Amino acid sequence: RKEVEQDPGPFNVPEGATVAFNCTYSNSASQSFFWYRQDCRKEPKLLMSVYSSGNEDGRFTAQLNRASQYISLLIRDSKLSDSATYLCVVNMKTHGNQFYFGTGTSLTVIP
Amino acid sequence: GAGVSQSPSNKVTEKGKDVELRCDPISGHTALYWYRQSLGQGLEFLIYFQGNSAPDKSGLPSDRFSAERTGGSVSTLTIQRTQQEDSAVYLCASSLEGAREPQHFGDGTRLSIL
């Protein structure tokens, strides 16, 4: 079983739609959680950290469910510029400070 | 402030040659990571440094791959006797110490083996 699993998609949604991605992780001792965004042929960029109480940044909301070991990302009022691959990342101190990446969920926002 | 810097941006070389990739992390970041990403694929972990030591080398795909970090700063990833399957984007990331500290990535080195 992979440490981090995501639905690869693709998700194709119209502009203005709300879309949600889920990610599950295998290690209950995982300590911190992040969502990254990766545009085609570019490096991953931090979108937001995910905190236990959930957090919001503009149109983006991240939630953490430790009991069920999943995190989610909700994007409201989708923009064309939101088209990208969204990577779920989990930090575990198994071998020092180790990060585990999901394979990413592809989102295309359609005009 | 400067972000993570990688060089070269692109490297094209013949099969069998050795290549050296460089990563200059964000100043003060003690943790440094190397990944590679083939076209359309996810990130593949290669190696992680804490300071100058490498607690986790488990991702290095073969003994042709090695990495070092000196002075707790710059790191080099060396691939000896390159093969065509080594073609990929090699990404470096750095972070502060601490479980809540995210990684910050460089632009990557696009390696093509002819």
Image (spheres, coloured by chain):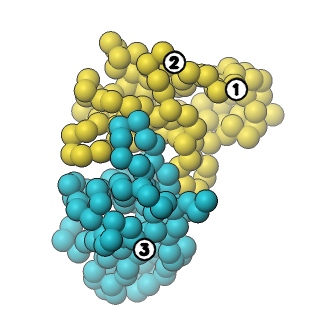
In what quadrant of the picture does the C terminus of chain B appear?
bottom left
Q: Spot the yellow chain and give its letter.
A: A
| Residue B81 rendering spot, x and y as whole percentages | 28, 82
Q: Quadrant of the N terminus of chain B?
A: bottom right
Q: Chain of mark 1?
A: A
Label 1 is placed on what type of residue? Gly
- SS for callout 1: loop
Crowding at mark 1 (Cα within 10 Å: few <14, some 14-19, many 20+): few
Check chain identity for marks 3 and 1: say if they share one. no
What residue is pinned by disc 1?
A58
Picture colour for chain B: cyan
Query: Which residue is at the front of the view, B38 or B4?
Result: B4
Specify the amino acid type for callout 2: Gly
Q: How far apart are the two marked residues, 3 and 1, measured between alpha carbons? A: 36 Å
**Circle on res. B22:** 3
- Is the C-beta separation of discs 2 and 3 under 8 Å? no
Whether A110 is drawn above or below A45: the answer is: above
- Asked which quadrant contains residue A42, the reply is bottom right
Instruction: Please indicate whether residue B81 sits to the left or right of residue B110 in the image.
Output: left
